[in-house]
Image: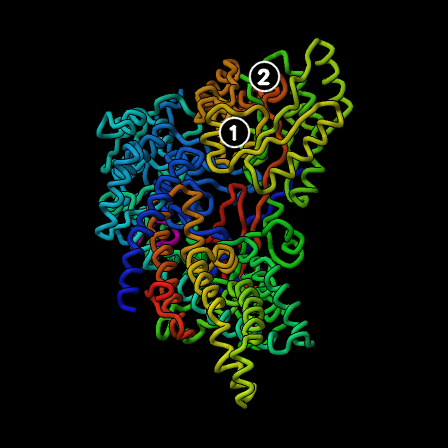
Amino acid sequence: MFAFIVRRLLQLIPTVFLAISFLFLLFYVLPSDPASIIAGGNNRTPDPLVVEQVRERYGLNDPVLQQFLHYWGRVLHWDLGTSFNNGQSVNALLAEKAPRSIRLAIWATIIEVIVGISVGLISAVKRYSLIDKLTTVATTAAAAIPAFVLGYLLQYTFAVTPEKRNWPDWLQLKTSRLGPDSWFLFFIPTSDQWRYLILPSITLASVSTALAARMMRGSMLEVLKADFMRTAKSKGLGERAVIFRHGLRNALIPVITLIGIDFGTVVGAAVLTETVFSWPGIGSQIVDSVFDRDLPVILGLSLVVVIAYVTVNLIVDMSYAWFDPRIRLGERAGG
Amino acid sequence: MPMVSSAAKPQAAAGGGELIDGSTFPQGTPSHLEPALNAELDSYQVVRAMYDGLTDIDTITDPAAPATVPHQAESYETNEDATVWTFQIREGLTFADGEPIVPSTYVRSWERAASLGGDYSYLFDFIEGGAEFRAGEGDSLTGVVADDEAMTLTVTLSAPYANFDAVAGFQVFRPVPEAAVASAENYENELMVGSGAYTMEAPRNDQEIVLVKNDAWGGDFSGNTWETRPDRIVFLISADVDTSFNSMEAGETMSASVPAGRAQDARDNWGSSLDVIQLASYHFIFNDRDERVGGEENVLLRQAISQAIDREAINEAIFNGMRVLSTGITPPGIPGFQENICDYCGYDPAAAEAAFGEWTAAGNAQDGPLPIQFNDGGVHNGVVDIIVENLAAVGIEAVPDPQPSEGYFSDFLGGGGAVFARVGWIADYPTYDNFTYDIFGTASLDLNNYGYSNPAFDDLVAEAKSTTDPEIRNGLFNEAEELLLNTDVMAVPINWYVGDLAWDESKVEGFYQDVLGLVHFEAITVVG
């Protein structure tokens, strides 16, 4: 197990290097001159001297290979550079935005785990019942509704309507923003923070929860048909024990994989949710930086997303051994 | 007749308090916040609240006719040919931390702004030695002389310019404290100290920008210190316009930007600036170098295109009736504005068909459908679809030709790719030359990549810019615009922008958006 972990951590290095290098080179393939864009070319024709000054200031005149080596030289010292847009340190930007995205991702994942697995499990156990039909409709709708539509609906229902109808304060949630920066154990909101967190978490979790529920249902149905489940029942175990002690752990493996992928995705790609709820995280910042051709920010934040993604997937892989004791991590097949 | 909102209402007895503003930053964190680097209208709201300049634009006395007035300069004068301007700086001016503002403060600030190379640094080319300084060929702005004893600032221009007083009050010319020099472009990430009605409470972050009352402020251009102005302004940053409006409806903010599709809601339930014409034009241009549309031989075609377009239908279908139909490029509110200056801006399909018929009878023919360019996304797709339909109705073949939004102005238009292309222009300052020289002059910023270059037009504009008599000057600008629109027909005006803000009248009084798009935060009283 230890060797497996070390090997996977070492794999992080070439993964990160290849991903970030690819993005670096992609920057120069994008249409439009980055110096013109940085000098305001999205809104007006910039002054040629201003464009030239931008090239000088940010080293955009240097050969691409030189810029590439210079960039990695700094990254090895964990200096991610400064934003072309406003001169802010990318390290500082990261320290500010990464925790926000991670907290939102944690809560979306908690919702996905609790609701998705529960709904999928019930749906499978009560197959073809009214509950199963209702959950099928609900999960299909949740997967189909675009995040921004759901977000606006939730804002209107839980923030605007209470204000217009003078509902009590405790029923009123917030439309957007982060709220007071007060947390327990990094991700548990204290004071009023929860009013700001609920709606974006639900919105972010909606599609992945629906997919997790569908996958859980399918996986559980497969497991319920297995021989070992029949054996457990024939040994006189109650239905609850059969399902939870024997069936669920086996059915969870593909679902855990999905949840792991989702977590990595939402850390860096929750753009729509972050935009609708003005939750200034990594995803929306990366998109803005692409439009602004802000290379240091694009690379710096993407670096973190890649690391988070690989780390989460490592944890997911390690969890397989717990869920299914037959799996021995790091051993060769047939060994 | 275009409607303009009334000026600030008389203030109620309440005052001070905290203004929670959701209207200024409805679409993300501002890139820049300081006078030397900012190029966005959103951030200009904050710059204006924090920094005063030599002059200001009075949009209160007569909102329909903004006028340039002295501000930090108590008076100014120019010589006969408008090449030398002398500003008498008021005594006793300071920044919020007590640092005095004297003529040399301007020199230091201008040299800093010119060397930082922000989007508007090219304006220093108006000053003698400015272009050389920006190119690194000199170590000072030779055309500016400061006398701190006599409290005068003398500016020699590189060319005659009768509207320099309006430009001199623009954000890039507003002075900043000495600390800004050492901090260079990083100053806007620190605690900025203002000289205007407000100063910063804390360095900005990506959630909010907070300003507090500057008790050292000497007042606006009329000396009014607006004693009931808010003590504190919190500019909340939203990433989405619809969300910003929802926030106001949820009682979380006192103002918001109005998203497309909610104009009627804003008019019915909130105070709004939707009837205030902005100094901004939405129009299309022809590339004079393109043989399909350019040159004298295609004047009739250009006339036909302009008259075929149903501007009212565009306004109703795409802009929810919110915009004002153009009768020229230059909008009302610009000194010298002449109503109905454009002969071909009315919807007249019969005349369009006749002009097109005359053009084809002269032996001309379309070499394929006319491509109509625009930056992809947003409302422009719908506008161009209607134009294509309108043109087809009079026999002119056309197709939409969307271009990537990124680099539309700098790369596509700047690279000379236009045939018949959409452009927009928002006034940097309320002068006629900003809508003539800066867009259509041969030596203008876009380096004339639209292809329009008429020496007669350039001469009229140059003469106007150097004429100090306002009546003669405005007449010359009118002639230039008539030449552009009626003789050469090189631009097709569509509409003028209108204000886009809404506010909660139960919580604030005196909130209004002027013709430049600016909110006068000092004039607001928090009542709720």
Residue at mark 2: B294
Q: Relative to residue B475, is residue A129 drawn left or right?
A: right
Q: Quadrant of residue A59?
A: top left
Number of numbered callouts drawn? 2
Q: Is residue B122 above or below residue A212?
A: above
Judge by depth and name the residue closer to the eye, B506 or A319.
A319
Badge 1 marks a residue whose secondary structure is helix
Magenta span: helix, strand or loop, mainly? loop
Distance (Cα) linking label 1 and label 2: 21 Å
Q: Relative to residue B364, is residue A238 drawn left or right?
A: left
Badge 2 marks a residue whose secondary structure is loop
Chain assignment, label 1: B
Does the magenta segment cover residue B192? yes
- Give the extent of the magenta segment: B190-200
Q: Residue at x 67, y 27 (%)?
A: B345
Local packing at callout 1 (Cα closer than 10 Å; few below 14, some 14-19, many 20+) is many
Q: Residue at x 70, y 25 (%)?
A: B307
Image position, residue B369 (x, y; %): 66, 23
Image position, residue A64 (x, y; %): 30, 35
- Depth check, mark 1 against mark 2: the one in front is 2
The residue furthest bottom is A236
Give residue B435's mark. 1
Q: Quadrant of residue B243?
A: bottom right
Chain assignment, label 2: B
**What colouring style does the render use?**
rainbow
Residue type at mark 1: give it: Phe
Does the magenta segment cover residue B40? no
Give the mark, 1 or 2, whose residue is nearer the N terminus: 2
